[in-house]
Image: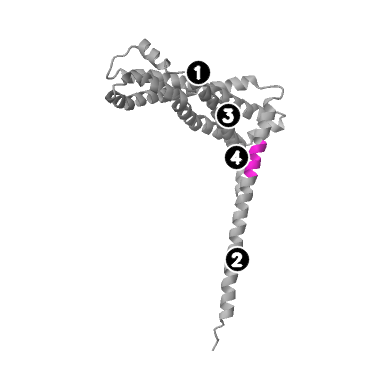
Amino acid sequence: MKKFNPVIKVKKIATEQSIRLVEKTIAKTAKASNFVTSIADVFLFITRVVKETFSRNFEFKEFLRQCFQIGYKTLPLISVTGIIMGLVLTIQSRPALLSFGAVGLLPGMVAVSLIREMGPVITALICAGKIGSGMGAELGSMKVSEQIDAMEVSSTNPVKFLIVTRVLAATLMIPLLVLYADALGILGCWAGANIKGNVTLVLFFSQAFGHIEFIDFLPALVKTFFFGAVIGFVGCYKGYRQGVEQRVWV
């Protein structure tokens, strides 16, 4: 009859625990290494894009085409978003102000809210969903179908032609779209104020812009340039590095 040896049993359990610990350590190390590699890759990508931006032979025609794609073709979506923002803010805020007898402050309150925070943030989110995903999908399909490799073989700089133009177009057009959304939001506020009231357009705009100062425009305008640059960089990076990211993370 075989005798039970507790020492061998303990050694076997300790060996299994050590193996599991080593496997978990290797997996965590691989994830950390991939994360650091991705951060370095993003930094190198941004550095190259900035370098190509200030180089010679700027692709001005492609830049104008991207401005048309990003700006003009996004106007219907931004128009609906801007009007809804102003209309909803007015409908939700008017009862509270009416109970305090401060309906006259409604145009200024909505205008300041739209210009400072609501307009830039919501417009940037809408543009990130439409423009950023469009850039990533377009560049990703070009990368997978080896069109970008063909451009490199034919002595065409794909970063300058594809990436720089899109990033600059997004950086320029997002602020203009935000201003457009703010204007339509104020018009939507006027329409909402006239649902249960009677305010002329001239009186409404005088009350709205009477509460707005230059300091309200400046931070919002700076944010919109930053939002546009981030949307352009992220969308282009995800599309341009599509195949590389799959090889790094597998």
**Numbered circle sitting on residue 214:** 1
Q: Residue 128's spot in the image, x, y percent?
A: 50, 31
**Numbered circle sitting on residue 242:** 4
Query: Which residue type carries mark 3?
Result: Ala
Q: Residues within 10 Å of mark 4 (few under 14, many from 20)?
A: some
Which residue is identified by label 3?
Answer: 229
**Callout 4 touching callout 1 (CB < 8 Å):** no
In the figure, is residue 185 to the left or right of 14?
Answer: left
User: Can residue 39 be found in the magenta stretch?
Assistant: yes
Coloring applied to the structure: one colour
The mark nearer the N terminus, 3 or 1, is 1
The mark nearer the N terminus, 3 or 4, is 3
Q: Quadrant of the N terminus?
A: bottom right
Q: Residues within 10 Å of mark 1 (few under 14, many from 20)?
A: few
* SS of the residue under disc 1: helix
Query: Which residue type carries mark 1?
Result: Phe
Numbered range of the magenta stretch: 37-44
User: Cα distance, mark 4 to mark 2?
Assistant: 35 Å
